[in-house]
Amino acid sequence: MSSEKTTELPLWVQDRDIVIAHDEEVQWREGKRPDYSYTNEFLHQESKFQHPEGSLEAIAQNLVRNFEMEASNKSNP
């Protein structure tokens, strides 16, 4: 998600890679940013639906993916 709509949305409902790129003062559990490149590729291949960018479905998917990333990889979400 990198269109004009993305910049209007709050950070926590944008694409997970955008959230990771804005990691000022974040303490990662492993000491570095997580790498979701394989997961992103797998999701794109296996997903039954390609939600339109900015749709409610895409926002909900991003929200869930960001919650998982925060809970799994940040020492202080």
Image: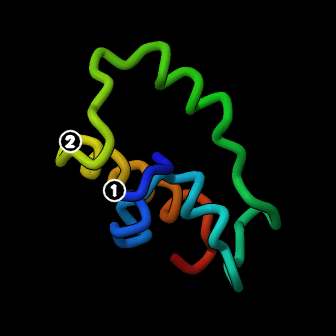
Question: Which disc, if any, is residue 7?
Answer: none
Residue pictured at 63% horizontal, 74% vertical: 75
Q: Which residue is mark 1?
A: 63
SS assignment at label 2: helix
Q: Earlier in the sequence, mark 2 or mark 1?
A: 2
Residue pictured at 62% horizontal, 62% vertical: 20
Near-viewer residue (61 or 10): 10
User: How many C-alpha atoms fall within 10 Å of the one at disc 2: few (<14), some, or many (≥20)?
Assistant: some
Near-viewer residue (1 or 61): 1
Residue 58: image x %, image y %?
A: 29, 43
Question: Of the residues shown, which amino acid type is indicated by label 2?
Answer: Glu
Question: Of the residues shown, which amino acid type is indicated by label 1?
Answer: Leu
Question: Which disc, if any, is residue 57?
Answer: 2
**Looking at this rendering, what residue extends furthest in the left direction?**
56
Residue pictured at 71% horizontal, 69% vertical: 28
> 45 above or below 41?
above
The quarter holding residue 61 reads top left
Residue 35: image x %, image y %?
A: 71, 45
SS assignment at label 1: helix
Residue 2: image x %, image y %?
A: 50, 50
**Looking at this rendering, what residue extends furthest in the right direction?**
31
Residue pictured at 41% horizontal, 58% vertical: 4
Number of numbered callouts drawn: 2
> 66 above or below 40?
below
The quarter holding residue 37 reads top right
